[in-house]
Image (cartoon, rainbow, N blue to C red):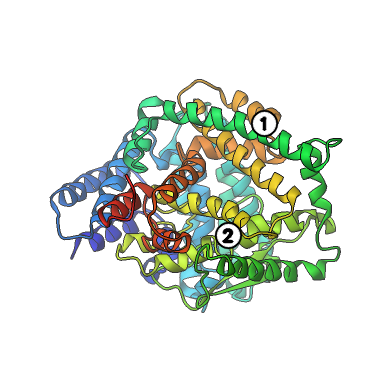
C-alpha cells in the first residue's frame, strides 16, 4: 500500500460520507465512528500515518505535501477544536449520509446502502450528543445544527418519498431517524455558549500549514483593508460614470429586475449564458473551456426543495472524482413564491455560468482529474460541510473568483452595470478576510462581525448570520477567496507565455494549494523573477 492509499484508507475509515462524495462506494452503508475514545484513537492513528508521510519519498511531491498538511492540521483540530464536539458536524454528516446517495451522481440508486444509513442515524446522533456532553459550544454552531436537524426531519417524514428511489418499507426507519433528529435538536438547548474564535496561534497555523501562505493573518488584514477601501472608491467612480444620479448600490439593485420574466425561461437562461461564457473564453484566448465532460442544467427535484436552503445543499457540486461518469447536474433552484429576481441575468452570468459552470469550477474539476497528483484530483470534493481538503481553497475558489473577472477581457460579455456587480464581489471578498481574521484573533465579536457584514460590506441581511457562523467553524477558509485571486493575479503577471497557456497550466495542477503551483511553475522556468 502506498502513502496515498494509506491516507485514503484512514480518511474513509473516519469519514465515510466523504468517501461517497469522492466516488468510493465501499463505505456507502456507514456513518462516521463516534463514541468513547474515538477522538483519542483517531489522533493516535493520525500520528502514526504522519510519521510514515514524513519519511516517505515515493509519493508525488504534491500528494506528500498535502498529506503532511492535512494530518498536521487534523492533529491540531483534534487537540483543540475536534469536529466531534460540534453539533453541526453531526447533523451535516447524518443528513448528507443519506442525501449523497440520492443525488444524480450516485445513480443507480443503492437501496441497501441508503437503508443502512437511515437505520444508523439514531445511534449516530445519540452517540454524538453523549460525546458533546455539557461541553460549551458556540451558539451559532448550535443554531446551525438545530436548523439542519429540523429540515432533515421534515425531509425524512415527507419529502424523501418524492424521490424516485423511495421504497415504502423505509418508512419506519425514516420516522425513527426523523425522531432522532428532533431529539438531537432539543437536547442542544442546555449547552453553554462558547467563544467561536480559534485564536491567533491556530489561525497562523492554518495560514502557514494548511494554505502554505507566506503572509501572516495580520498581513492579510492590512492588505484586505487597503483593497476594501480601494474597491469602495472604484465603485463610486464607476457608478458616477454610468449614472451620476444613482449610487452604486442602487445601480446594482436594479440588475435584479433584468432577466427571465417567466419560470419556463429560467433554465434556458442558464444554458444560454453557459454557452456564451465558453465561447467568449475560447474566442478571446482566455482559457480552454471543458467540452468533453457534460454539464446539465436541470430544475431542482421537488424532493430537495425544502432542504436546499437550511442545509449545505449546493446547486453545483463537484463530481465524484473517483467515479465521475460522463457529466454533472447543475440544479436551477426554484424562486420563492414565483420570484425570479434571484435568476437575474447578471447573477446567472457571473455566479452560475462563469464562477460555477462553464469555465469556472466545472472546467476546473474536469481538468483536475488529469492531474499527476492523485489527491489533486479529489481534494476539492464538496462534502457535507465544505471541501474535503481545505488546503485546495486558494486555487479552487481563487480560480472561480478570478475567472469572473477574466471574462471582463472578453469585450461585451458584461454590461457596465454588471462590472459594478463584479467590483462589489471583489470588495465583499476583501471584507471576508477582515471578518475571518478579526473574528478568530478576538479583535471582533460575532456581533461585531455581523454588523460589519451587514452595514459596511453589503451582505444580504438574510445571509449575514450564517456567513459569520461559517467563518467561525472554518477558520481561514473565507479569506482564501480574496487571497487566492490576488495570488493568481500575481502569478499571471510573472508568467512568460500566453494568457490561455497560463490558465490551462494553472488548472492542470488539480486541486492543490496555489503555493504548490507557484513552485512548479518556477521550477519549470515559466515565471519571471
- The answer, for residue 454, to whether it is visible in the render is yes
Q: Secondary structure at mark 1?
A: helix
Q: Is residue 443 above or below residue 162?
A: above
Report the front residue among 448 and 150: 448
Q: Is residue 384 above or below residue 112?
A: above
Q: From the top left corner, tell me how far across and down residue 218 is, in percent.
A: 43, 25
Q: Secondary structure at mark 2?
A: helix
Q: From the top left corner, tell me how far across and down residue 105 is, in percent.
A: 52, 71
Quadrant where the N terminus is found in the figure:
bottom left
Quadrant housing residue 202: top left
Q: Which residue is mark 2?
A: 356
The answer to which of marks 2 and 1 sits earlier in the sequence is 1
Quick check: 493 left or right of 147? Answer: left
Callout 1: 10 Å neighbours few (<14), some, many (20+)? few
Q: Which residue is mark 1?
A: 233
- Measured Cα–Cα span from mark 2 to mark 1: 28 Å
Amino acid at each position: 500500500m502506498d502513502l496515498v492509499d494509506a491516507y485514503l484508507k484512514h480518511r474513509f475509515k473516519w469519514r465515510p460520507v466523504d468517501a461517497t462524495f469522492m466516488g468510493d462506494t465501499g463505505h456507502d452503508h456507514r456513518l462516521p465512528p463516534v463514541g468513547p475514545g474515538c477522538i483519542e484513537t483517531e489522533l493516535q492513528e493520525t500520528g502514526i500515518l504522519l510519521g510514515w508521510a514524513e519519511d516517505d519519498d515515493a509519493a508525488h511531491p504534491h500528494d506528500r505535501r498535502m498529506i503532511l498538511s492535512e494530518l498536521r492540521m487534523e492533529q491540531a483540530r483534534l487537540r483543540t477544536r475536534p469536529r466531534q464536539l460540534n453539533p453541526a458536524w453531526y447533523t451535516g454528516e447524518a443528513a448528507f449520509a443519506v442525501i449523497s446517495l440520492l443525488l444524480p451522481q450516485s445513480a443507480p440508486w443503492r437501496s441497501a446502502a441508503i437503508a443502512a444509513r437511515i437505520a444508523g442515524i439514531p445511534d449516530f446522533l445519540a452517540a454524538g450528543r453523549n460525546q458533546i456532553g455539557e461541553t460549551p459550544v458556540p451558539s451559532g454552531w448550535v443554531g446551525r445544527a438545530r436548523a439542519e436537524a429540523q429540515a432533515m426531519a421534515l425531509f425524512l417524514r415527507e419529502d424523501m418519498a418524492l424521490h424516485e428511489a423511495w421504497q415504502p418499507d423505509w418508512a419506519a426507519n425514516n420516522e425513527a431517524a426523523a425522531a432522532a433528529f428532533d431529539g438531537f435538536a432539543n437536547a442542544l438547548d442546555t449547552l453553554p455558549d462558547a467563544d467561536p474564535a480559534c485564536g491567533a496561534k491556530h489561525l497562523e497555523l492554518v495560514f502557514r500549514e494548511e494554505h502554505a501562505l507566506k503572509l501572516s493573518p495580520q498581513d492579510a488584514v492590512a492588505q484586505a483593508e487597503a483593497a476594501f477601501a480601494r474597491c469602495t472608491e472604484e465603485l463610486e467612480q464607476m457608478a458616477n460614470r454610468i449614472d451620476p444620479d444613482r449610487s452604486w448600490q442602487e445601480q446594482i439593485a436594479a440588475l435584479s429586475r433584468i432577466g427571465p420574466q417567466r419560470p419556463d425561461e429560467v433554465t434556458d437562461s442558464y444554458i444560454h449564458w453557459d454557452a456564451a461564457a465558453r465561447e467568449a473564453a475560447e474566442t478571446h484566448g482566455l482559457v480552454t473551456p471543458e467540452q468533453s465532460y457534460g454539464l446539465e442544467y436541470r430544475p431542482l427535484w421537488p424532493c430537495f426543495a425544502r432542504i436546499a436552503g437550511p442545509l449545505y445543499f449546493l446547486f453545483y457540486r463537484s463530481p465524484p472524482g473517483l467515479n465521475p461518469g460522463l457529466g454533472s447536474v447543475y440544479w436551477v433552484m426554484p424562486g420563492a413564491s414565483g420570484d425570479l429576481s434571484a435568476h437575474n441575468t447578471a447573477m446567472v452570468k457571473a455566479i452560475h455560468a462563469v464562477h460555477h459552470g462553464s469555465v469556472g469550477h466545472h472546467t476546473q474539476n474536469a481538468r483536475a482529474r488529469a492531474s499527476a497528483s492523485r489527491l489533486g484530483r479529489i481534494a476539492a470534493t464538496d462534502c457535507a460541510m465544505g471541501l474535503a481538503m481545505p488546503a485546495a481553497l486558494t486555487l479552487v475558489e481563487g480560480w472561480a473568483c478570478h475567472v469572473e473577472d477574466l471574462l471582463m477581457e472578453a469585450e461585451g460579455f458584461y454590461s457596465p452595470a454588471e462590472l459594478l456587480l463584479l467590483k462589489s464581489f471583489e470588495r465583499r471578498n476583501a471584507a471576508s478576510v477582515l471578518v475571518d481574521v478579526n473574528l478568530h484573533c478576538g479583535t471582533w465579536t460575532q456581533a461585531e462581525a455581523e454588523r460589519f457584514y451587514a452595514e459596511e460590506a453589503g451582505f444580504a441581511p438574510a445571509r449575514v448570520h450564517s456567513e459569520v457562523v461559517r467563518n467561525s467553524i472554518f477558520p481561514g477558509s473565507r479569506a482564501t477567496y480574496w487571497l487566492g485571486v490576488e495570488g493568481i493575479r500575481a502569478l499571471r503577471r510573472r508568467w512568460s507565455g500566453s494568457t490561455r497557456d497560463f490558465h490551462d497550466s494553472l488548472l492542470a495542477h488539480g486541486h492543490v494549494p496555489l503555493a504548490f503551483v507557484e513552485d512548479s511553475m518556477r521550477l519549470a522556468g515559466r515565471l519571471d523573477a
